[in-house]
Amino acid sequence: MKLNPYLTFNGDARAAFEFYAKVLRGEIVMMLTNGETPMRDHVPATAHQRIAHTRLMIGDQVLMASDGPEGSSCDTKGMMVSLMVETPAEAERIYGELSVGGTVTMPLAETFWAQRFGMFTDRFGIPWMVNCEKPMTA
């Protein structure tokens, strides 16, 4: 079993995932608009460019998303995307790039469990945690 986050956007899934692919050094392996699917005739023409489904591969991890229906609310209450990284430098790079234009909840800093930990909501409204844990000691 795998657990994969599925994000919903309000018309900016393409921009968000192109940004995430760049920052997270991943690859968008699928991006399909409503207009490219069999549901094309069942949605307004104004929704044809909205993303029906996209999939971003980051190593062996998957992040997926779509745009919600026009006029729908895409709140992300009760969830955060958590990134576990290997080095403090990678935590600083990712935190610095993903948080631009967003709202910082907790500045990136050392904590009792992490070499670096911080939280923010990005410019697309997605809440993130970036965590670089301290080495485990026996």
Image (cartoon, helix red, strand yellow):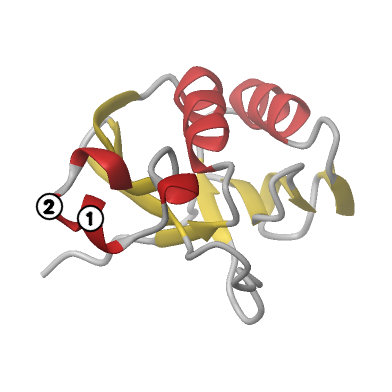
Front residue of 44 and 9: 44
Closer to the camera, 16 or 106?
Answer: 16
**Placement of 71 over or under 63, stated as above or below:** below
Quadrant containing the N terminus in the rendered view: bottom left
For badge 1, the amino acid type reads: Asp
Residue 72 x %, y %: 59, 72
Q: Residue at x 38, y 61 (%)?
A: 6
* Residue type for callout 2: Pro
At x 17%, y 64%, the residue is 2
x then y, percent, for residue 103: 88, 49
Q: Position of residue 100 (x, y in %)?
A: 82, 30
Q: Mark 1 and 2 residues: CB-CB less than 8 Å, in contact?
A: yes
Q: Is residue 27 above or below residue 48?
A: above
Q: Nearer the viewer, residue 55 or 46?
A: 46
Residue 118 is left or right of residue 38, and the answer is right
Q: Is residue 95 left or right of residue 16?
A: right
Instruction: State the residue position of label 2.
Output: 38
Image coords of residue 13 (percent x, y): 50, 43
Q: Is residue 122 left or right of residue 133?
A: right
Query: In the displayed image of the protein, which residue is found farthest to the bottom?
Result: 78
**The one of 71 and 132 positioned closer to us in this rendering:** 71
> Which residue shows up at 69% across the image and 46% down it?
124
Which of the 4 image quarters holds residue 97?
Answer: top right
Q: Is residue 19 above or below residue 104?
A: above
Which class describes the residues within 10 Å of circle 2: few (<14), some (14-19), or many (20+)? few
Visible residue check, residue 1? yes
Q: Mark 2 falls on what kind of element? A: helix
- Residue pointed to by mark 1: 41
